[in-house]
Amino acid sequence: MAIEAVSVPLGARSYRVKVGPGLIDALGAEAKELGLGRRCVLISDSNVAPLYASRAVAALRAAGFEPVEVTAPAGEKSKSLDQAGAICERMIEAGLDRKAWVLALGGGVVGDLAGFVAAIYYRGVACVQAPTTIVAQVDSAVGGKTGVNARNGKNLIGAFHQPRLVLADVDTLGSLPAREFNEGFAEVIKHGAIRDRALLDAVANLDRANLAPIIRRNVEIKAAIVSADEEERTGERALLNFGHTIGHAIEAAAGYGRLLHGEAVSLGLVAACRISVKRAGLDPAEAARITALLDQYHLPVRLPEGVAADAILSALKADKKFEEGAIRFVLCPRLGEAFVSKEVTPADIAEAVAALR
Ligand code: NAD
Ligand code: GLY
């Protein structure tokens, strides 16, 4: 059965997102339809490449493409300028020019890194995203935010660079370890909290054998927000940062690699809900519902030992969401709605972080 794509309408940069089974084997045919150049680089990581790269390469070759394979070490530490530079050097050595394109095969780390390489290589080449985690399928592969981490902050070095196509093969989610599977639900719960309370019911009663509809719904939510505010200028796209201001700071304070991104976001969501109760009138029972859902997916709702509140608060100051000293903080007044506030104070944040103990 043909898979109906979700479209991301962005004028000349519009693209389609397909969600369904078996899409890795369709990579070559789909890329051919876009009229992409013959040569490409397939960027993956050391966990994903052994599982799926040979199928992706076979699909590309069958459609006449000549892929060069590059495999980064798995994990957040690969989201670095050094790694991006090394991949670009490898592409230069392989003789790839500006007609070449990038295929990102992996989770959010590979997608952000490979997307960034595509944004800077020869000042920008085409990119196709083939996300293989829930985080990447529901969030990071869609929307064109690419980048790497700085020593003192997540995603501080990057570029907007929309993919030409996203193919989310839901079969790949079957090989995700339990921790990485659960991690993805922090972003799903975030989407429900800011846009669609019915999604929260679906998350509470998940049918793991039928993930495509839930992933597709998340892509629709993200596509609508991105097409309304591609470069996060009007405040609409900033809503996607719900739970991320404190979440990113916790991720950095814990040391990249200790908490998975979604685990840090889970803690950030609990804190953001607490602040929403105080500053936006969120019903405490609705805040408790979010905490219970995160807990249902075994996501942390209490800070792990050894992550100091001071370190979290100093990491916050390096965040992009601090605008000339003021905090742009996303609040949720009722489940399914959100807005950006400048009323949240450092004391509110310190109190919410302390309450995570
Ligand atoms: P990840 O890419 O590190 O993947 C998690 C782990 O699962 C890794 O060890 C990976 O090798 C492994 N893996 C991936 N797919 C697999 C599969 N199908 N089977 C078995 N193992 C597999 O992490 P992630 O959670 O996917 O993404 C987190 C990253 O995404 C963070 O860096 C975060 O900042 C970024 N992100 C970006 C955006 C954006 O808009 N650009 C949005 C959300 C998150
Ligand atoms: N993940 C947040 C965004 O894409 O804007």
Image: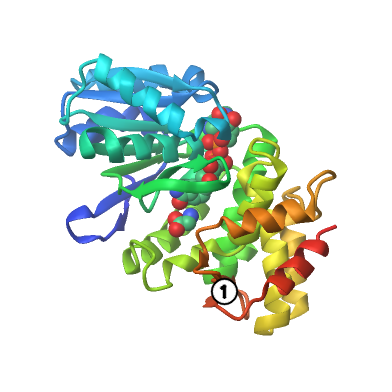
Residue 255, image x, y percentages:
68, 39
- Residue at the disc numbered 1: 336
Residue 302, image x, y percentages:
81, 54
Residue 281, image x, y percentages:
69, 85
Tell me the SS state at disc 1: loop
The outermost residue toward the front is 324
| Between 23 and 151, the one nearer to me in the picture | 151
Q: Is residue 276 above or below residue 116?
A: below
Residue type at mark 1 is: Gly
Q: Residue at x 29, y 43 (%)?
A: 165
Q: Is residue 198 above or below residue 134?
A: below
Q: Residue at x 39, y 23 (%)?
A: 86
Number of numbered discs present?
Answer: 1
Give the quadrant of the N terminus.
top left
Residue 8 makes an appearance in the image? yes
Q: Is residue 61 above or below residue 102?
A: above
Residue 184, image x, y percentages:
59, 47
Q: Residue at x 36, y 69 (%)?
A: 233
Side (left or right) of 12 relative to 265: left
| Residue 26 in which image quadrant | top left
Side (left or right) of 218 relative to 265: left
Residue 107 makes an appearance in the image? no
| Between 312 and 251, the one nearer to me in the picture | 312
Q: Residues within 10 Å of mark 1 (few under 14, many from 20)?
A: some
Q: Is residue 253 above or below residue 55?
A: below
Give the quadrant of the C terminus.
bottom right
The quadrant of the picture showing ligand 1 is top right
Figure coloring = rainbow
